[in-house]
Image: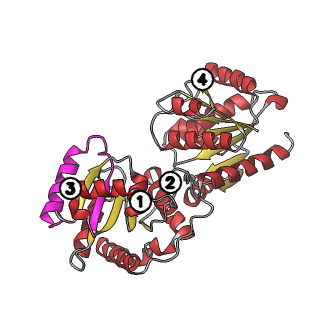
Amino acid sequence: MRIVQLVPSLDEGELAQEALEFAVELVRLGHESAVISAGGALVSRLTLHNCQHVEMPVNQRKWLNGRLHRKLRQQLKALDADILLCRGAQCAWHGAQAVKRLPAGQRPRLVTSVHQWPTTGLFRKRRVNAALVRGELVLSASDGLGQQVSQRYADARALRTLYRGVNTRELDKNAPVSGHWHHRMLNDFPQLEERNWLLLPGPIGPGRGQEQFLELLAVLKQERQDIFGLIVGDISPGQEKFVRALEQRAATMGLSEYVLFLGPRRDMRELYASARITFDLAGDRSAAQRPSGRVVAESLAMGCPAVALGGTGVELLKHCFPQGVLDETAAGTAVARLDALAAITRDILQNPGPLDFSGFSLTETTSRAVEWFNDLQAISCE
């Protein structure tokens, strides 16, 4: 099967990374895989794995773009695509416009993918955003997002949830952590020895959960001296002052010996494997900024329990590790939420429940998508 993805760009970012992982996994499973995008840093990694890349400005936000649509039609003919998977509203619009003018015998089956709630705007809402549900198959990144889509667009066709899978060959929980890595970590940070590591990965900035994490550590350190918080991630653009204030707040709260700001790391597999719990405390923000659940998925893939406050992470926990789901009825206020969060953390540290990540690896989610594509192919074109 020839599967072509239409992606805004292959610059660094969750959407580009997901498209890359999906394309490479398709090739590994024996399919032909191509990506059409505006280019970016990940193109070299894509082509290294025998995936074809075609550079076109499909990230353009101009919704009337006949020249682009003509070129896109020509390219789809040349690629002889069976499936056109359009990621995001803009690509769904360009893809739908190109496909509808192709002869029936040369028309790939149109699949659209919703990764976050689309941005607003009069023409975007009525035309571009509505293209998200023009696919013969519509893939949603989570159940919650799928419910929003079906409520907003009553004409959504076959809508199915496809969580972003985790590459368990890279994040292999059965591969041991090298003694050299652990020795170096303790040499760099001797205060970590004989402590229970609590991990908070993700961009550092307002609303990302770092403040709640410090509050949690302040509560827990009153009861046990063996906990230690690790805040991992890049500083969000323009948030340097926020980070300095956060570090000062940690010192004021008496957490200097209980928390470290590690910055961005390339050893997340080892950190997940060594941590007792991973946290995703971004919470349920606006629909467009809802947490993607990536941190939770990676942690669970490594066999590390996780706790989440909202977004896709909570959905994953309900499937894989219900013990990490915060009881919403017990967390109405900030104080109640902190109490509930501390209670869950204590419970997991003392008696972690079973964790089952089956069904969410990259191989499993990609195979599931291919099955749906095959079902679509079996339906004769109108």
Q: Residues within 10 Å of mark 1 (few under 14, many from 20)?
A: many
Residue placed under numbered mark 1 in the picture: 272
The answer to the question of whether label 1 and label 4 lie on touching residues, with beta carbons closer than 8 A, is no
How far is the residue under mark 1 from the one under mark 4?
46 Å
Q: In x, y percent, where is residue 250?
A: 18, 61
Counting residues from the start of the chain, the first of labels 4 and 3 encountered is 4
User: Mark 1: which amino acid?
Assistant: Tyr
Q: Tell us which disc is closer to us: 1 or 4.
A: 1
Say which mark, if any, is on residue 246.
3
> At 47% across and 75% down in the image, what residue appears?
323
Q: Secondary structure at mark 3?
A: helix
Q: Is residue 250 magenta?
A: yes
Residue type, label 4:
Asn
Please determine whether, in this image, residue 57 is positioned above or below residue 330: above
**Residue beneath label 2, please?**
171
Label 2 crowd (10 A; few <14 / some 14-19 / many >=20): many
Q: Secondary structure at mark 1?
A: helix
Three-letter code, disc 2: Leu
Specify whether residue 155 is in view.
no
Left or right: where does residue 107 sit relative to residue 277? right
Residues under labels 2 and 3: Cα distance? 30 Å
